[in-house]
Amino acid sequence: MATISEMQEEKPSLPFNASFDPSNPLGFLEKVLGFIGKESDFLLKDTADKEIASAVTAAKKRLREAEEEKESWKPFEKKLKEEIEKMMFDERQKHDLKKKSMSQYDSLGMCTERRFRMNLTNKPNLDPSNPLGFLEKVLDFIGKESDFLLKDTAEKEIASAVTAAKKRLREAKKEQKESLKPLEKKLKEESSQPMEVEKPKKESLKPTEPMEVEEKPKEEEGPIVPNKGNGLDFETYSWTQNLQEVTITIPVPSGTKPRSVTCEIKKNRLKVGLKGQEPTIDGEFFNAVKPDDCFWNIEDQKLISVLLTKQDQMEWWKCCVKGEPEIDTQKVEPESSKLSDLDPETRSTVEKMMFDQRQKQMGLPTSDEMEKKDMMKKFMSQHPEMDFSNAKFN
């Protein structure tokens, strides 16, 4: 007899704990599928649907065989029950042991029910190397605790639950990868600037005074460091951004009503201000927006707030309106992602990019350059007969 306590393996395994409601076995199965998807890659296999369908069919077969065996014992149990009742009657007549005989009858009458009772307090464990075995035991448990597997629609309902679980798993993986794209793009942009570090070295022989005079106007003419919201602050308005949206804030006289505001948002242009006055902003966007997903409102009757949804949600804007000063997008600070939340492959890539970025900032070789250097040293040590004193390496 299989009980839920048998799911505990001697191998290292992961504990699973969820309450079972006999009136909603499919809900319990959905929790199990979610747990399997989180702790293993089984649901991402192309054959997962077929393997689960086969496991369901096998569980139903075992359940029907158990029911048939149970039915075959009914005549014997009926006859045994009659003999016990007759024996109990005779005993009561002879020895007046009614209480004792009734307690014996009760224990015999309840044996079948106890035989199939499950211990729901034990916590089953999942062996990530054998998720299908875990699922088979769960199906047996559901079959013994409810009539769900005997339904004609059981296979279809379980197949739908498996499909839904796989869809949720794929969407979670996709969202994780999408959230990493801004970080990867920023690291690539910053790691592709080795020449900027080398320029001062080439000009290090020049007098220091002319260098200072030349650098100052270059800094003034170059991009501006963005504000804390990755945008800029002006006298009449300010703007901030993330990869998906741009927010514009315009201060207006206290008590301003919405009817006093004029705001036209088009795909590539914005015109906003107070009626009867020159517009605060009237120009072309840095990039296109989605007009249907943009809106404006009055905050505390003293600020006009305009929310713009970017059409290209993988690019940082250098300015809100063309012609305005531009920010240095390489100094934008995107929302941070925790390395511990990443899958091992992506985490390794990000850590390598971060290491290379730090090495370049300090004027040190990157991981690829260090690997090539080690290979060259190894080659030179293996060929002492060769003279490398006049060799030039890139």
Image (cartoon, rainbow, N blue to C red):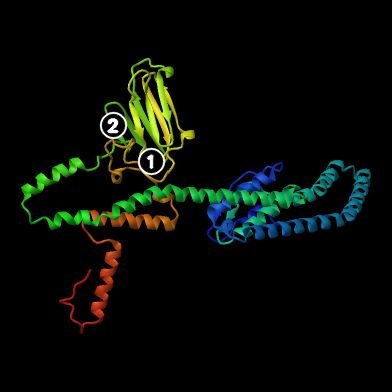
Task: Say few, some or many: other residues with alpha carbon within 10 Å of mark 2 (under 14 / 14 to 19 / 20 or more).
Answer: some
Mark nearer the viewer, 2 or 1:
1
Q: In the image, which disc is placed on residue 287?
A: 1
Residue 370, quarter of picture: bottom left
- Residue 152 lies left or right of residue 344; in this view the side is right
Q: In the image, which disc is placed on residue 211?
A: none
Q: Which residue is pictured at 27% across the width and 65% down the height?
A: 369
Residue 368, quarter of picture: bottom left
- State the count of labels: 2
- Residue 92 lies left or right of residue 50; in this view the side is right
Asked if marks 2 and 1 touch (Cβ < 8 Å), the reply is no
Q: Using the rendered image of the protein, determine whether residue 381 is visible from the camera's viewpoint.
A: yes
Whole-angstrom CA distance, mark 2 to mark 1, is: 19 Å
| Quarter occupied by the C terminus | bottom left
**What residue occupies the far top of the structure in this picture?**
255
Q: Which residue is pictured at 29% across the width and 57% down the height?
A: 356
| Quarter occupied by the N terminus | bottom right
* Residue, disc 2: 233
Q: Position of residue 92 (x, y in %)?
A: 91, 43
Q: Which residue is pictured at 27% across the width and 43% down the height?
A: 328
- Residue 62 lies left or right of residue 316; in this view the side is right
* Type of amino acid at the residue the image marks with label 2: Asp
**What residue occupies the far bottom of the structure in this picture?**
385
* Callout 1: SS: loop
Q: Nearer the viewer, residue 308 or 228?
A: 308
